[in-house]
Image (spheres, rainbow, N blue to C red):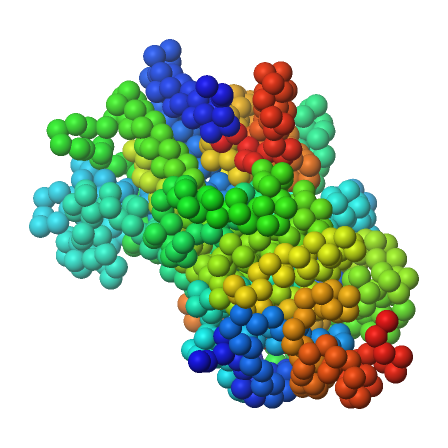
């Protein structure tokens, strides 16, 4: 059984900087993996490489066993990869409902979308996603009028509606209040098992809530892997990331 | 039955079509001809709105597609005209005869080095088809090159501007092919079956009005599809659309080409109504003026841009009674344009949309219906 | 051959003078100022008016045009451009609207012709300014015949480019401008008054265009429409040269001037312009960061 998403010696070199250095990662189907590391450790770049936003200079990316190395972004998306960005990226001039309609299109081809409306099943699915992200009340609101937290949930909703096999979530709680963070943790926990999820996060409390396995990155390389306890007690991780005082 | 927002659009579109179809009843031939010109400009408004408001592509050289369409039909109509030499194997336009080398053969194949390009235009249907096909083709090519490279919107705009400038230079320069500055004049009338479309005939007006209505409704239906919604998403955030799996350049190129096709059709209709094609269609001031119509009327509203184009031209025609008034009008429209860009990004249609939203909300609340959307989903189209 | 190259150089020089201002405003503010061509036009008219009304030669017109167009640029920035920060396409359109207004202002004698007053030197028609006598004719340097006026243009452009370089790289204000070019938010966070610097930058760029206008009035007819084609040329040069690269602008103006010069010596002026457009379009399409961009990522 191949891993849901895996990288082999993945590397990307920019002039003067090796942002991701021979990273080999393997995430099983249905697993929830947290990517941890200081700013500049290469976590977002790693996600960019997997989703196709950035081209690698060496190594391979595999999704469900298929080699997608340096494929075009939209082709990787079609094969089942969904991406949520650090800065919420939604369709700002359209309503929440319209945003989700776009994400739930059964087919992404131009020709097949020259039709009108959605099937009942698709509309019900959108209703489910709205319910999950607690956005039912604002379904007709223009996305740019949403609060920051709501926009993050909308983007999460878009990725869920896309129904990919792998979810790449980049700091889903950035800029959120404590209660918003808790709600996000619940949403992500409810997705566990149905999707394979790779999450970049800083918020340790949030990580405690959702993490199973953690991969710690530092300066573009994988520093350590394991569950929370293993990572917390790892000397190198403490030195590089957590600081000598441990987790606070 | 509750009155829904969608129904409002239907009513407004229907009203507009009804008005333009009925207008000739009260106007004399001269005014009918003038109005048909404005309707052609209305089509250009639709084309700009489709490209700019919906696809997010600001084409500063839309005149290129308009001119291409115009010249294609004009070439066919020129060959059919009595001013072209009709007595040899192929008709030969008068300007080619005047400018030919002594001893040149009076035949399209060889009277000058580029005249052979005119040969297919002996058939009127070729000119008609080319008038829509050529602009679409150019747009498709441009789109494929520009959009695949993910050039920033501003770069695309500057390139469209440079492109129309370049083509204008070449059209003017190639006197043997295009008659240069003078353009193509003394054209035959468009003939379909046994019917001839005289510019001052009501039939010509209806040809334009029906074409406009079809273009308007067609475009409105197109943007109402899921593909149209996806296109607007691409306009708002290309990266997000891409990582949802959509082939962004394909969508952009298609809608860009449809916009070009509408502009080309408008060009052909203009030739029928005004009886000439000229390089002035490729002037940058004309292309920019089209953008002004859409900016003031409402870039994200097909009908708004269309009405904006018609109304602005009507006012300009009235103002051009005196030279001073015309200049004053230019200043006023320039000012309105700047103010619209600064403060009214959705144009007058957007303003009308917000007002009608608020009225709608008050009316629904008065009827005890649920709280209505707190923001216009789309301005009244 | 050399004279063709020389002509190309002088074309490039005018192009550079126009593009310098654009490069700085685009580089530091990311603003595409479609009214820049009208700054050139206003500079030309300044020369015309000074000649008619004050009988002042064109050497004196240069600083006056600089000040006048810098002032106009400053006002435009404060009233319009500032409100559209971040909205690039809208800035293009708004400045184009202003360009239209400026053209009409000149055509209407600043509005006075509407009430029947005509100002000599303004209005819809063409104006002509003679190149100064001391620059007429030909100068011979190292055995090569050089048109004196063109030579002066090249000299002046060289001086102004050097002055701009000094301003940008050797003064505190220049450091601020360059900081804003790299990262406006960080610059603001470091205490730089971004708004004031942007206004001054815009004014300076417009002023340079005004000087270009004075130079252009010496060899072409002056009309309210003379500015329009200028801005597209200028932008293509700036974008080809690379965002934020002064050297890049210099190079691309020079190269494009030469291409224009050579092609027009072989065919016609018109084809030369079309050829230059084609080359520039291709460069932008295939190297959107320009030939000399310093951006690494």
Judged left or right of residue C47, residue A158 is left
Residue toward you, B93 or B62? B62
Above or below: residue B277 compared with residue A113: above
Which residue is drawn at the image coordinates 75% and 45% (left, top)? C83
- The reply to whether residue B317 is visible in this rendering is no
Judged left or right of residue C285, residue B257 is left
The percent coordinates of residue A193 (x first, y second) are 54, 66
Which residue is drawn at the image coordinates 18% and 33% (left, top)? B191
Q: Residue furthest top?
A: B26
Judged left or right of residue C189, residue C10 is left
- The reply to whether residue B377 is visible in this rendering is yes
The percent coordinates of residue C267 (x first, y second) are 42, 67
The percent coordinates of residue B122 (x first, y second) are 16, 47
Q: Quadrant of residue B145?
A: bottom left
**What quarter of the picture does the C terminus of chain C occupy?**
bottom right
Residue toward you, A43 or C276? A43
The percent coordinates of residue C143 (x first, y second) are 62, 84
Which residue is drawn at the image coordinates 86% and 54% (left, top)? C196
Residue toward you, B323 or B56? B56
Residue toward you, A187 or B242? A187
Above or below: residue B234 compared with residue B330: below
């Amino acid at each position: 059984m191949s891993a849901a998403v895996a990288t082999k010696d993945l590397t990307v070199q920019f002039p003067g900087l090796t942002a991701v250095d021979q990273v080999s990662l393997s995430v099983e189907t249905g697993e929830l993996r947290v990517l941890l590391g200081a700013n500049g450790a290469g976590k977002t770049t790693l996600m960019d490489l997997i989703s196709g936003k950035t081209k690698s200079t060496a190594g391979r990316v595999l999704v469900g066993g298929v080699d997608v190395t340096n494929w075009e972004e939209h082709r990787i998306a079609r094969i089942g990869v969904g991406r949520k960005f650090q800065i919420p990226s939604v369709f700002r001039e359209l309503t929440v409902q319209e945003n989700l309609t776009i994400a739930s299109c059964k087919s992404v081809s131009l020709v097949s979308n020259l039709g009108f409306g959605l099937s009942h099943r698709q509309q019900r699915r959108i209703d489910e996603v709205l319910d999950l992200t607690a956005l039912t009340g604002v379904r007709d609101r223009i996305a740019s009028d949403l609060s920051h937290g709501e926009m993050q949930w909308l983007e999460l909703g878009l990725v869920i509606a896309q129904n990919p096999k792998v979810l790449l979530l980049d700091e889903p709680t950035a800029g959120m209040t404590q209660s918003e963070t808790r709600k996000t943790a619940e949403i992500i926990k409810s997705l566990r098992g149905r999707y394979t999820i790779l999450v970049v996060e800083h918020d340790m409390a949030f990580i405690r809530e959702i993490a199973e396995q953690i991969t710690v990155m530092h300066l573009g390389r994988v520093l350590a892997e394991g569950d929370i306890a293993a990572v917390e007690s790892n000397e190198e991780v403490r030195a590089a990331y957590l600081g000598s005082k441990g987790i606070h | 039955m509750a009155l829904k927002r969608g129904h409002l659009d239907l009513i407004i579109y229907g009203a507009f079509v009804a008005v333009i179809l009925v207008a000739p009843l009260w106007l004399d031939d001269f005014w009918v001809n003038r109005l048909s010109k404005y309707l052609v400009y209305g089509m250009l408004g639709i084309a700009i709105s489709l490209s700019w408001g919906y696809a997010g592509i600001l084409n500063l050289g839309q005149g290129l597609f308009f001119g291409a369409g115009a010249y294609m039909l004009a070439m066919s109509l020129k060959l059919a005209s009595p001013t072209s030499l009709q007595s040899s194997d192929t008709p030969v336009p008068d300007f080619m005869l005047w400018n030919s080398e002594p001893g040149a053969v009076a035949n399209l194949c060889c009277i000058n080095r580029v005249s052979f390009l005119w040969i297919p235009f002996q058939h009127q249907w070729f000119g008609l088809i080319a008038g829509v096909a050529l602009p679409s083709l150019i747009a498709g090519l441009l789109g494929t090159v520009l959009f695949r490279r993910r050039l920033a919107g501003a770069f695309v705009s500057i390139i469209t501007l440079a492109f129309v400038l370049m083509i204008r230079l070449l059209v003017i320069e190639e006197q043997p092919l295009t008659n240069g500055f003078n353009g193509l004049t003394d054209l035959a009338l468009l003939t379909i079956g046994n019917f001839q479309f005289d510019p001052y005939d009501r039939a010509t007006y209806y040809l334009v009005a029906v074409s406009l209505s079809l273009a308007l409704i067609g475009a409105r239906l197109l943007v109402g599809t899921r593909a149209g919604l996806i296109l607007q998403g691409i306009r708002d955030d290309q990266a997000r659309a891409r990582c949802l799996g959509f082939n962004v350049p394909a969508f952009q190129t298609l809608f860009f080409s449809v916009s070009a096709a509408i502009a080309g059709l408008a060009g052909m209709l203009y030739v029928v109504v005004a009886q000439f094609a000229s390089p002035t269609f490729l002037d940058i001031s004309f292309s920019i003026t089209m953008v002004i119509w859409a900016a003031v009327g409402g870039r994200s509203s097909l009908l708004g841009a269309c009405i904006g184009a018609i109304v602005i031209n009507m006012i300009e025609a009235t103002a051009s009674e005196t030279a001073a008034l015309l200049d004053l009008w230019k200043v006023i429209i320039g000012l309105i344009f700047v103010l619209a860009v600064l403060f009214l990004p959705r144009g007058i249609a957007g303003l009308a949309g917000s007002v009608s939203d608020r009225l709608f909300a008050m009316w629904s609340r008065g009827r005890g219906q649920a709280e209505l959307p707190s923001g216009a989903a789309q301005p009244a189209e | 051959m050399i004279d063709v190259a020389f002509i190309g150089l002088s074309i490039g020089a005018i192009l550079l003078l126009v593009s310098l201002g654009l490069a700085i405003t685009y580089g530091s503010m990311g603003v595409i100022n479609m009214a820049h061509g009208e700054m050139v036009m206003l500079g030309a008219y300044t020369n015309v008016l000074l000649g008619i009304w004050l009988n002042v030669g064109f050497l004196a017109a240069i600083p006056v045009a600089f000040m006048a167009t810098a002032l106009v640029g400053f006002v435009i920035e404060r009233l319009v451009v500032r409100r559209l920060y971040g909205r690039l396409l809208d800035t293009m359109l708004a400045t184009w609207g202003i360009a239209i207004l400026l053209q009409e202002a000149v055509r209407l004698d600043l509005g006075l012709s509407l009430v029947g007053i005509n100002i000599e030197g303004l209005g819809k028609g063409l104006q002509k300014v003679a190149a100064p006598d001391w620059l007429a004719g030909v100068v011979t340097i190292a055995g090569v015949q050089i048109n004196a006026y063109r030579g002066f243009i090249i000299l002046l452009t060289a001086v102004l480019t050097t002055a701009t370089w000094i301003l940008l790289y050797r003064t505190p204000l220049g450091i601020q401008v360059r900081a804003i070019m790299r990262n406006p938010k960080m610059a603001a966070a470091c205490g730089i008054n971004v708004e004031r610097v942007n206004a001054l930058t815009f004014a300076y760029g417009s002023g340079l265009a005004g000087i270009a206008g004075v130079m252009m009035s010496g060899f072409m007819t002056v009309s309210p429409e003379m500015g329009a084609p200028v801005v597209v040329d200028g932008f293509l040069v700036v974008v080809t040269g690379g965002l934020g690269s002064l050297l890049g602008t210099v190079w691309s103006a020079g190269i494009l001037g030469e291409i224009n010069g050579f092609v027009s010596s072989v065919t016609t002026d018109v084809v030369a312009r079309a050829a230059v457009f084609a080359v520039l379009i291709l460069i932008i399409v295939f190297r959107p960061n320009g030939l000399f961009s310093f951006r690494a990522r």
